[in-house]
Image: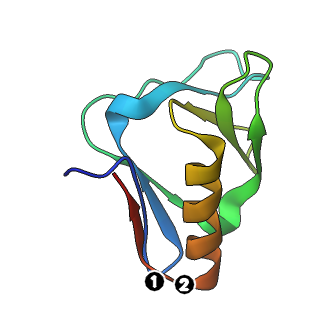
Amino acid sequence: MNFKLRSTKEGLIYIRQSIILNLKRPNALEGAKVLGKPVIINVNHIGFLSHNMDGNVTFFMANGFEISMNVFHNEAEEVFNCAKAGLEKEVL
């Protein structure tokens, strides 16, 4: 597993665990913690891609979660767009 981000033809995005800075639901009582394997998300569940209050690149999910990552915005945007289009893409 050499990739940081990967999109699939099915519209999934794999996020390598080591680049995740924070995975939380700001309005919930408890945050979520990620350990070990990649996080897999469906691109259709992403509300938008932007920077959070700390300036980190973040996927803002439709269910209220925020996934902040240690990647460049253009890398995350490229994988997001490829997943939306049903194309495979890896960012190393």
Residue drawn at 57 percent across, 74 percent down: 82
Residue drawn at 52 percent across, 37 percent down: 71
> Residue 73 in the image: x percent, y percent?
65, 43
Coloring basis for residues: rainbow
Residue drawn at 76 percent across, 32 percent down: 51
> Residue 78 in the image: x percent, y percent?
60, 62
Horizontal arrangement in the rendering, residue 74 relative to residue 48 (left or right): left
Cβ–Cβ below 8 Å for labels 2 and 1? yes
Establish if 22 lies above or below 6. Answer: above
Three-letter code for the amino acid on which mark 2 is drawn: Gly
Residue drawn at 24 percent across, 33 percent down: 36
Establish if 10 lies above or below 40. Answer: below
Horizontal arrangement in the rendering, residue 54 relative to residue 75 (left or right): right
Report how far apart the C-alphas of labels 2 and 1 lie in the structure: 4 Å
> Residue 86 in the image: x percent, y percent?
54, 84
N-terminal label among 2 and 1: 1
Establish if 4 lies above or below 80. Answer: above
Q: Which secondary structure lies at badge 2?
A: loop
Q: Which residue is mark 1?
A: 9
Q: Which residue is mark 2?
A: 86
Number of numbered labels in the structure image:
2
User: Dividing the picture into quarters, in which one does residue 56 lie?
Assistant: top right
How busy is the neighbourhood of tag 1: few (under 14 within 10 Å), some, or many (20 plus)? Answer: some
